[in-house]
């Protein structure tokens, strides 16, 4: 019979209330952090920031990027450029300045990926300090 770690150690686990999913395991006066990292702790490890540029009617391509990043537990910002002229200009600069919004566009640090190209995204994430994809995710490209 397997027992939960908290029973084996006779300690209680508590949930950190924040925008992260870190569990704190208290053992006496010591605290052990367990779980996924918050955006701020990721920044402390020098991970590149990740941003998804989208528009309201982007559909499946944006959903696929969003799902992939969430499945990999990668913190990211999403910027909807649908009605924001400044974001549209920012997006236009990132995509070559042709006057058309190309979404999804993902930035990992200073690297921009136009469209959902999983292989390019994985390479950019690894260069940005993120680990290889979690099990069950392959390197197939959705170009």
Image (cartoon, helix red, strand yellow):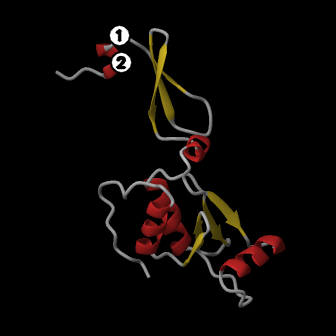
Q: What is the quadrant of the C terminus in the image?
A: bottom left
Q: What is the quadrant of the N terminus in the image?
A: top left
The location of residue 106, given as percent across then percent down, is 58, 69
Q: In the orientation shown, which residue stands out farthest toward the bottom?
A: 98
* Residue at 47% in and 40% down: 36
**Residue on which the image places disc 1:** 10
Q: In the orientation shown, which residue stands out farthest toward the right?
A: 85
The location of residue 14, given as percent across then percent down, is 50, 22
**Residue on which the image places disc 2:** 6
The location of residue 95, given as percent across then percent down, is 65, 82
Q: Which circle marks residue 47 in the picture?
A: none
Against 129, is 13 above or below?
above
In this view of the protein, which residue sits in the foreground, 138 or 7?
138
* Residue at 51% in and 67% down: 65
* Residue at 57% in and 74% down: 59
Crowd around label 2: few <14 · some 14–19 · many ≥20 (10 Å): few
Pointer 2 with pointer 1, Cβ within 8 A? yes
Against 133, is 18 above or below?
above
Choose top left, top right, bottom left or bottom right for residue 34. Answer: top left
Compute the Cα span from label 2 to label 1: 6 Å
């Amino acid at each position: 019979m397997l027992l939960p770690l908290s029973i084996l150690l006779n300690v209680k686990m508590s949930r950190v209330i924040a925008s992260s999913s870190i569990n704190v395991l208290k053992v006496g006066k010591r605290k052990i952090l367990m779980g996924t990292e918050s955006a701020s702790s990721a920044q402390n490890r020098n991970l590149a920031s990740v941003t998804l540029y989208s528009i309201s009617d982007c559909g499946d391509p944006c959903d696929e990027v969003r799902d992939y990043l969430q499945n990999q537990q990668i913190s990211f910002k999403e910027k909807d450029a649908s009605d924001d002229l400044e974001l549209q200009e920012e997006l236009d600069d990132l995509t070559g300045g042709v006057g058309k919004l190309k979404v999804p566009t993902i930035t990992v640090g200073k690297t921009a990926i136009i469209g959902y190209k999983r292989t390019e995204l994985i390479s950019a994430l690894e260069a940005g300090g993120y680990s290889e994809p979690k099990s069950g995710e392959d390197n197939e490209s959705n170009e």
